[in-house]
Image: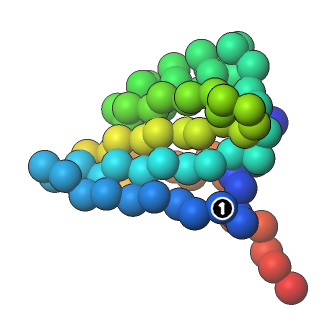
């Protein structure tokens, strides 16, 4: 499982009632991982694309409708607790 890179900059943009997010990952991802992640997002009515990095970690691109209710999705991960 590839983790989100908490040291990198998260890019957010709100356009036409949609939230667009670019989330840097910590490592490259396999084609199978990409396909499964995109299918999972599609099942939750979220557009997701995973783009490989040219010479490094992948990037996760998400588009979430602003009208989405919290009851329509459940987080798959929780951020790590930092002490």
What residue lies at 66% left-to-right and 29% top-to-bottom? 54
> What is the secondary structure assignment of the residue under circle 1?
loop
Across and down, in percent, residue 26 comes to: 76, 47
Label 1: how many Cα within 10 Å (few below 14, some 14–19, many 20+)? few
> Which quadrant of the rendered structure holds the N terminus?
top right
Residue 81 seen in this snapshot: yes
Question: 54 and 26: which one is in front?
Answer: 54
In the displayed orientation, state which residue is furthest to the right: 83
Classify residue 61 as left or right of residue 60.
Answer: left
What residue lies at 59% left-to-right and 16% top-to-bottom? 35
Residue 2 versus residue 81 in the image, above or below: above
Q: Which residue is mark 1?
A: 8
Residue 79 versus residue 19 in the image, above or below: below
Question: 67 and 25: which one is in front?
Answer: 25
> Which quadrant of the rendered structure holds the C terminus?
bottom right
What residue lies at 69% left-to-right and 52% top-to-bottom? 4
In the displayed orientation, state which residue is furthest to the front: 55
Classify residue 63 as left or right of residue 67.
Answer: right
Residue 44 seen in this snapshot: no
Across and down, in percent, residue 17 comes to: 16, 52
Which quadrant holds residue 42? top left
Residue 38 versus residue 15 in the image, above or below: above
């Amino acid at each position: 499982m590839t983790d989100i890179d908490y040291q990198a900059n998260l890019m957010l943009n709100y356009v036409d009632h949609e939230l667009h997010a670019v989330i840097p990952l910590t490592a490259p991802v396999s084609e199978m991982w990409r396909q499964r992640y995109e299918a999972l997002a599609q099942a939750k009515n979220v557009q997701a694309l995973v783009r490989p990095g040219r010479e490094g970690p992948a990037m996760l691109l998400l588009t979430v409708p602003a009208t989405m209710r919290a009851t329509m999705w459940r987080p798959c991960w929780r951020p790590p607790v930092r002490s």
